[in-house]
C-alpha cells in the first residue's frame, strides 16, 4: 500500500521514522513518500521536502514567509494527487497539516493524524475541524481522549512514542571522552531546534555559566541550524557543544535548562531535573496570553496535571530567576527528589513503550479493512 506522511519539525522526523518502522513491520511492501528529515529517510521513506525548509516560528515569521509557505502547500497538494496514496498520515505541525487534511478529505483520500495538534491548549474549537477532516486520530497523551470526547469524537490512545525512542537508545560508554567533556557535573542546555528559539534562549541560558563554577555547561545543538549560531558563544563562555546527541548528553547530565517543547518530556524520561524556559516576541506573547487554555506550557506539568517542574516564561525568565531555580535543582536535594518523584508519576501515567508499532499496526489494519 502507499503512504504519504508529512512531518514538519525535528521531533516529527523522529516520531515519523519510528512510525514508518511500525508500518513496515505490518506491511513489508509499503511505499512511503514523505515530508520529513534524515531519520525518516533512513527508515525507508522517500523524502521530497526536508523539515529544515519549513521551520517558521511565530506569527510575524509566518506572515513574512507566507508566499513561500503557500508555495509549499500548493506543491504538496499536487504531489499527493500525483502519488495517489492509500492514506495521508499527518504528524503534528498543525498550521500546515490541517490545510492538507482538508484538501485530502475533500479529494477523497483517507486521512490519519498521528500526534494531535495541541487544540486542547488553545483554540479548542479546532477539534471540530479535526473531526471533520481526519478519519482517524491517534493520540499520545492520555488526557487527549477525554478532551475529544467533549466533541463526540472517538480517538485512539497508542502510548507515547518518546518511550520507543528512549528505549531503543543505548548510551555511548565513552561519551564524555569522545566529545572531550571532563568529569565535572554537567548542566545541559537545550535551547530548541528553531533558529528564532535558539537566538532568544541561548543568551539567557548561558547567563548562568559563571553563577555555577562547580558545573560545566554543555549545549545540545542541532545540525539543521547554522553552526555559527552556537559557536560564537564559545568565545564568551567556557561551554562545550554537542551536535545531534541530546540523548547521550542527557544520559550524563545532572540538571538541565530546557526550552519548552518535546525536550521537556525527554529530559523527564531521562530523570534529569530541569528548569523549563520560554520567551517569545512581545506581540506573540500578547496573543498567547489571550488564547492559551491550559495552566502549564511544559508537557511534564500537563501530563502530571500539576507543577512538577518550574516554568520560567516571558517576563519571569530573568537571570536572577534562573539562578534561583537552577540552585534548587542542583544543590537542594529535597527539590531534586521531588522532581524525580514527579517524573516517575509521569512514566506511570504514560504507560509502556510500543506506541509507534501500535500506531503502525492499527493504521495498516484500518486501511486493509477499508479496501
Image: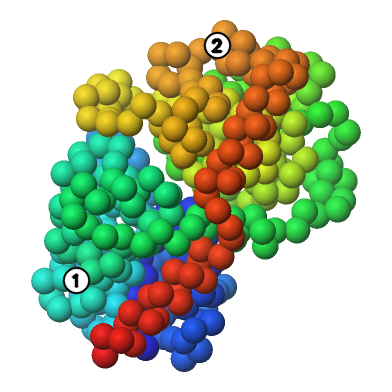
In the figure, residue 4 lies in which quadrant? bottom left
Which circle marks residue 23 in the picture? none
Cα distance in 3D space between marks 1 and 2: 47 Å
| Image vertical order of residue 253 relative to residue 87, above or below | above
Residue situated in front as seen by the camera: 171 or 282? 171
Drawn side of residue 250 relative to residue 37, left or right: right
Q: Position of residue 41 (x, y in %)?
A: 51, 72
Where residue 338 appears, x then y in whole percent?
65, 25
Q: Which residue is mark 2?
A: 321
Question: Could you tell me which residue is drawn at 16 percent across and 71 percent down?
Answer: 105
Dividing the picture into quarters, in which one does residue 335 lie?
top right
Q: Residue at x 58, y 58 (%)?
A: 352
- Expressed as whole percent of the image width and height from the top left, the position of residue 321 reads 55, 11
Quadrant where the C terminus sits is: bottom left
| 333, 34: nearer the viewer | 333
| Closer-to-camera residue (336/59) | 336
Q: Nearer the viewer, residue 1 or 233?
A: 1
| Pointer 1 residue | 104
Up/down of 69 relative to 76, above or below = above
Q: How many marks?
A: 2
Amino acid at each position: 500500500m502507499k503512504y504519504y506522511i508529512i512531518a514538519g519539525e525535528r521531533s516529527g522526523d523522529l516520531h515519523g521514522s519510528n512510525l514508518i518502522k511500525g508500518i513496515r513491520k505490518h506491511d513489508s511492501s509499503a511505499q512511503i513518500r514523505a515530508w520529513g528529515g534524515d531519520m525518516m529517510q533512513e527508515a525507508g521513506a522517500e523524502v521530497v521536502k526536508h523539515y529544515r525548509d519549513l521551520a517558521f516560528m511565530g506569527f510575524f515569521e509566518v506572515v513574512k514567509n507566507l508566499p513561500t509557505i503557500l508555495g509549499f502547500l500548493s506543491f504538496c497538494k499536487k504531489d499527493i494527487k500525483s502519488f495517489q496514496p492509500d492514506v495521508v498520515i499527518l504528524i503534528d505541525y498543525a498550521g500546515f497539516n490541517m490545510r492538507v487534511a482538508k484538501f485530502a478529505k475533500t479529494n477523497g483520500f483517507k486521512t490519519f493524524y498521528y500526534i494531535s495538534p495541541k487544540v486542547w491548549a488553545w483554540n479548542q474549537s479546532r477539534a471540530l475541524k479535526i473531526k471533520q477532516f481526519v478519519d482517524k486520530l491517534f493520540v499520545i497523551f492520555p488526557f487527549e481522549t477525554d478532551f475529544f470526547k467533549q466533541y463526540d469524537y472517538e480517538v485512539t490512545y497508542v502510548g507515547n512514542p518518546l518511550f520507543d525512542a528512549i528505549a531503543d537508545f543505548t548510551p555511548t560508554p565513552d561519551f564524555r571522552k569522545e566529545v572531550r567533556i571532563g568529569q565535572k557535573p554537567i548542566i545541559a542546555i537545550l535551547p530548541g531546534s528553531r533558529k528564532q528559539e535558539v537566538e532568544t534562549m541561548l543568551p539567557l541560558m548561558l547567563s548562568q555559566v559563571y553563577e555555577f563554577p562547580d558545573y560545566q555547561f554543555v549545549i545540545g545543538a542541532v545540525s539543521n541550524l547554522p553552526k555559527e549560531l552556537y559557536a560564537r558563544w564559545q568565545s564568551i563562555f567556557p561551554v562545550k557543544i554537542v551536535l545531534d546527541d541530546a540523548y547521550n548528553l542527557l544520559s550524563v547530565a545532572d540538571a538541565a535548562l530546557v526550552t519548552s517543547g518535546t525536550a521537556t518530556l525527554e529530559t523527564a524520561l531521562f530523570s534529569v531535573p530541569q528548569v523549563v524556559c520560554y520567551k517569545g516576541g512581545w506581540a506573540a506573547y500578547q496573543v498567547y496570553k489571550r488564547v492559551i487554555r491550559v495552566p502549564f506550557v511544559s508537557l511534564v506539568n500537563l501530563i502530571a496535571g500539576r507543577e512538577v517542574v518550574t516554568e520560567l516564561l516571558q517576563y519571569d525568565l530573568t537571570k536572577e530567576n534562573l539562578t534561583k531555580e537552577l540552585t534548587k535543582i542542583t544543590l537542594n536535594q529535597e527539590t531534586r527528589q521531588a522532581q524525580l518523584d514527579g517524573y516517575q508519576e509521569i512514566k506511570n501515567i504514560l504507560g509502556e513503550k510500543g506506541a509507534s508499532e501500535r500506531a503502525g499496526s492499527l493504521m495498516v489494519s484500518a486501511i486493509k479493512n477499508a479496501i
